[in-house]
C-alpha cells in the first residue's frame, strides 16, 4: 500500500463505516440488522488495518506544517476516539460513567469527524485512478478486506477466550441490562427530552381513529394485553421485560383508509408506524406487573418489539390514525 492507495481505501472505508453505522440504528430485527452491524465492524476495523501505512503519511505531513494542521490533528484524535470506543464497546465496556455510554462517545465523535474528514480529503489530491480497478489492485482490495474480516473475527474470538461481556452481545452489538427487573433499566432519552410531571388520575389519552375522536383514561388502557419484548437502545444496551396494557389494534379497531399511526408524547416527541403493524404494537401501562415509573414513561408508553428504543415513545398523549405513509418522518427523532 502506498500513500495514495491508502488514502483512496480510507475514502471508501470511512464513508462505508458512517453509512453502515447509521443504518445499524434503523434495523431492529436480525434479518438485515446483523449483516449491517458486522459490515460496520469490519469497515471500521479496515480503517485500523490501514493505520500502519497511514501513520507514515501522517509523520511526513506533520513535518511539513501545512496550514490546516490543527484540523488534521483534531481529525486524527477523533478517528482514534471513534475506533477505540467502537472496539471497547464491542469488547463489553458499555458505559464510561453513569450518564455516558461508550457508544454515545463513539457516535458523537463519528458525527464530529464527518465534516473534518470531508474537508481534509477535499484539500488533498488523492484521487482514484483506473488502475485501482485492475486485477492486481483487486487482489490488494481482497487482502485489505481479509485483514478487516480477520480483525473482526479476532475480536470475536478474543472476547470469548477472555470471557468479556462482548461474547454475548446482541446482533445489534448491545449488551444486556436488568432483564426482568424494571427498576434496573436505565432511564434514557433520545436527545433533549426531560421527564414530565404527569398525574395519571387526570391524564387523558387522545385517540383519533376511523370512529372519530375520543379521550381515554388510564383504566381504559390498563386492559391486560401482555407481551414480553426486548427494548434495545442505540446507546448500546438491551433489556427484556414483560409489559401489559392495550394492543394498538384493540385500541383503534379497523384502520379504514389510514396508512400510518402516529404516537405522540406529552413532550411532543412522536413516531409514525405502518397500520399493518398495529397488532405488533402495545400501549403499555405496566412493566413486570407494576405501573410504570415516571422515567420509564408513566402513565403509558409504546412497546414496539423488533424496533430500536427510540421508537418506544414514552409519556404518550395521543394515538392517531393518519392518511400519510409511514415513512413521512425523519428517520431519527429531532428532539
Ligand atoms: C468514521 C466512522 C466510524 C468508524 C471508523 C467506526 C468504527 C467502529 C469500530 C472499529 C467498531 C468496533 C468493531 C468491532 O470491534 O467488532 C465499531 C462498532 C460500532 N459502531 Fe462504529 N464507527 C463509525 C461510525 C459509527 C456510527 C455513525 C454509528 C452509529 C450511528 C456507529 C455504531 C457502531 C455500533 C453500534 C458498534 C458496535 C458493533 C458491535 O458491537 O459489533 N459507528 N465502529
Ligand atoms: N417521549 C420520549 N420517548 C422516548 C425517548 C424520548 O427522548 N422521549 N427516548 C427513547 C429512547 S432513545 C429509548 S432507548 C427509550 C428508553 O426507555 P427507558 O427510559 O424506559 O429505558 O425510550 C424512548 N422513548
Ligand atoms: Mo435509546
Image: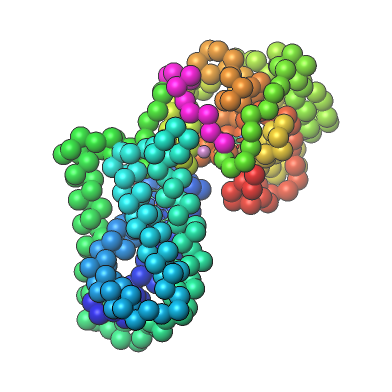
Residue 45: image location, x then y, percent: 29, 58
Residue 250 figure quarter: top right
Residue at left offset 64%, top offset 15%: 223
Residue 323: image location, x then y, percent: 75, 45
Describe residue 262's horizontal placement relative to residue 113 as left or right.
right
Residue at left offset 38%, top offset 82%: 126
**Extreme residue in the bottom direction:** 130
Describe residue 334's horizontal placement relative to residue 208 as left or right.
left
Q: Is residue 79 above or below residue 35?
A: below
Residue 182 colored in magenta in the image: yes
Name the one closer to the observer, 58 or 95: 58
Name the one closer to the observer, 60 or 320: 60
- Range of the magenta residues? 180-189
Residue 89: image location, x then y, percent: 34, 43
Residue 25 colored in magenta in the image: no
Q: Is residue 16 visible?
A: no
Q: Is residue 168 visible?
A: yes
Residue at left offset 46%, top offset 45%: 104
Q: Is residue 89 above or below residue 132?
A: above
Name the one closer to the observer, 266 or 257: 266
Colour convention of the picture:
rainbow
Q: Quadrant of the C terminus?
A: top right
Q: Is residue 7 above or below residue 73?
A: below
Q: Total marks drawn?
A: 0
Q: Is residue 303 above or below residue 333?
A: above
Residue at left offset 33%, top offset 39%: 93
Describe residue 169's horizontal placement relative to residue 315 as left or right.
left
Residue 207: image location, x then y, percent: 77, 29
Q: Quadrant of the N terminus?
A: bottom left
Main secondary structure type of the part rendered in magenta: loop
Amino acid at each position: 500500500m502506498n500513500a495514495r492507495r491508502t488514502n483512496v481505501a480510507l475514502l471508501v472505508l470511512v464513508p462505508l463505516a458512517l453509512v453502515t453505522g447509521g443504518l445499524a440504528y434503523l434495523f431492529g430485527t436480525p434479518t438485515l440488522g446483523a449483516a449491517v452491524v458486522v459490515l460496520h465492524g469490519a469497515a471500521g476495523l479496515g480503517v485500523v488495518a490501514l493505520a500502519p501505512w497511514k501513520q507514515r503519511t501522517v509523520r511526513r505531513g506533520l513535518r511539513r506544517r501545512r496550514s490546516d494542521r490543527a484540523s488534521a490533528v483534531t481529525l486524527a484524535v477523533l478517528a482514534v476516539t471513534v475506533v477505540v470506543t467502537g472496539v471497547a464497546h464491542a469488547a463489553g465496556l458499555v458505559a464510561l460513567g453513569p450518564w455516558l455510554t461508550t457508544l454515545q462517545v463513539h457516535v458523537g465523535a463519528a458525527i464530529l469527524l464527518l465534516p473534518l474528514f470531508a474537508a481534509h480529503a477535499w484539500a488533498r489530491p488523492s484521487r482514484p485512478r483506473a488502475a485501482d480497478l485492475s486485477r492486481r489492485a483487486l487482489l490488494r482490495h481482497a487482502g485489505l478486506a481479509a485483514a478487516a474480516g480477520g480483525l473482526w473475527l479476532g475480536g470475536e474470538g478474543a472476547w470469548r477466550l477472555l470471557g468479556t461481556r462482548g461474547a454475548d452481545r446482541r446482533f445489534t452489538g448491545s449488551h444486556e441490562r436488568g432483564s426482568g427487573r424494571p427498576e434496573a433499566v436505565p432511564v434514557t432519552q433520545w436527545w433533549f427530552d426531560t421527564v414530565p410531571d404527569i398525574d395519571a388520575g387526570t391524564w387523558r389519552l387522545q385517540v383519533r381513529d376511523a370512529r372519530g375522536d375520543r379521550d381515554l383514561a388510564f383504566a381504559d388502557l390498563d386492559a391486560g394485553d401482555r407481551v414480553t419484548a426486548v427494548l434495545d437502545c442505540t446507546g448500546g444496551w438491551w433489556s427484556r421485560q414483560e409489559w401489559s396494557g392495550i394492543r394498538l389494534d384493540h385500541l383503534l379497531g379497523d384502520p379504514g383508509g389510514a396508512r400510518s399511526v402516529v404516537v405522540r408524547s406529552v413532550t411532543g416527541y412522536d413516531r409514525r408506524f405502518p397500520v399493518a403493524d398495529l397488532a405488533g404494537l402495545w400501549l403499555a401501562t405496566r412493566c413486570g406487573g407494576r405501573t410504570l415509573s415516571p422515567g420509564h414513561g408513566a402513565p403509558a408508553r409504546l412497546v414496539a418489539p423488533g424496533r430500536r428504543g427510540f421508537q418506544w415513545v414514552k409519556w404518550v398523549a395521543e394515538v392517531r390514525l393518519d392518511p400519510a405513509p409511514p415513512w413521512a418522518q425523519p428517520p431519527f427523532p429531532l428532539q
